Amino acid sequence: MNPLALLAAAPAVPYDKAGRYVAAAFIVLFAVVVIYVAIMATKLQRLERDLSELNSALDERERAAAAPDAAAAPPAPEAAARRRDEVAT
Amino acid sequence: MYGKGLRALTLATLIALTATFALVVFYAPNDADQGFIQKIFYVHVPVAIITLVAYVVGGIFAYRQLRTDDRRWDVRSYVVIHIALIFNVVGLLTGAIWAKASWGHWWVWDEPTLVSFLIVFLLYATYQPLRFSIEDPERQARYASVFAVIAGAFVPLNFMAVRMATSLVHPRTFATADGGLPGEMMFVFLVSIVAMGLLFWTLVKYEIAQKNVTWQLRALRRRLLGDDAVAPIGRSAAPTIAPEARP
């Protein structure tokens, strides 16, 4: 069935006092849900911030662990060749 | 994993709430006595029923906590009671709107159903301060569970006492002598109860998942950066040990 036809066939919502009270009751329910979702969104933001902090701390730790290895590693072929050229001149 | 199935549950809740709203507006007939105002019934009564059932469920979870000393039951009991309190506020507000529309007053003190619902709300409003007043998490969980069990037992007793009280003002949903709801209204009412129940359970699952992730992150921070990197836990009404982050 066409939704527009269904809408047209449906009883009219009274926009007088009664309609306003019924709308207010439904709005209370949805407002509470929206407030709850907003609070949960704030908490989610906090969790994301904590997670990114932990990620950067982990990155720093990995960099620090990799740095001494790089110092102890044998020189790269290009650097070794350059050094050889310097010694030759 | 408390987030498991949350997407499906959220979708089901959205569909059920939309269906309820559409049925209330387009399908449910207007009440012969109250007219269009009676449609508040499809929000107010299911919310009130779910609230009372949730308080009893919170008491059952608290009983499990006392029996097993498993803190996961304390978390579940706390979250269920927390969301039930929010639903209780919605029930009180929608009831006040209905009272104003039908009786011309926001509140009627000589109506046992309204006053008993307020008493239940005030009783559970002390749950959070009670938890907050106890710093030791173990004692907090135990005392809060004892409270939740006793208060949970009070809820059905209170409901029965109110049903037995004679009142000419507040309507009965499932009347026994004067006939109940007509079929179409009953159908919409049952759909609404399912929708509110789904909404309740979705919010509970979201909150438990959020608490669990928070505590997992805290445990991870401690493992990665050491004890000094983790801020000390202040006094809180919420349970302070995560279900899955325990040592």
Image (cartoon, rainbow, N blue to C red):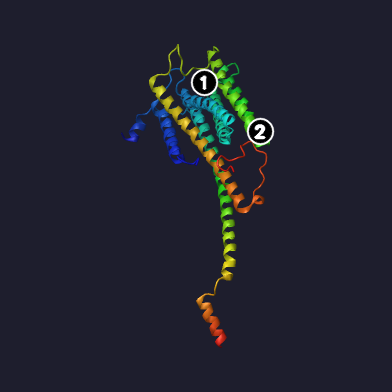
Number of the label disc, if any, that sits on residue B9? none
Q: What is the quadrant of residue B139 in the picture? A: top right
SS label for mark 2: helix
**x, y (%) of residue B238?**
61, 37
Query: Which label's residue is closer to the chain start, 2 or 1?
Result: 1
**Quadrant of image for the N terminus of chain A:** top left
| Tag 2 and tag 1, C-beta contact below 8 Å | no
The answer to whether residue A42 is visible is no
B156 versus B239 height, above or below: above
Q: Which residue is mark 1?
A: B102
Say which amino acid is labelled 1.
Ser
The answer to whether residue B49 is visible is yes
**x, y (%) of residue A80?**
53, 79
Q: Tell me what residue is drawn at x 45 percent, y 13 percent.
A: B176
Q: CA distance from mark 2 to mark 1?
A: 47 Å
B244 versus A59 height, above or below: above
SS label for mark 1: helix
Q: Which residue is mark 2?
A: B139
Q: Nearer the viewer, mark 2 or mark 1?
A: 2
| Residue B156 placement, left or right of B20 | right
* Dot 1: chain letter: B
Say which amino acid is labelled 2.
Arg
Mark 2 vs mark 1: same chain? yes
**x, y (%) of residue A17?**
50, 26
Mark 2 neighbour density, 10 Å: few (under 14) some (14–19) many (20 or more): few
**Quadrant of image for the C terminus of chain A:** bottom right
* Dot 2: chain letter: B
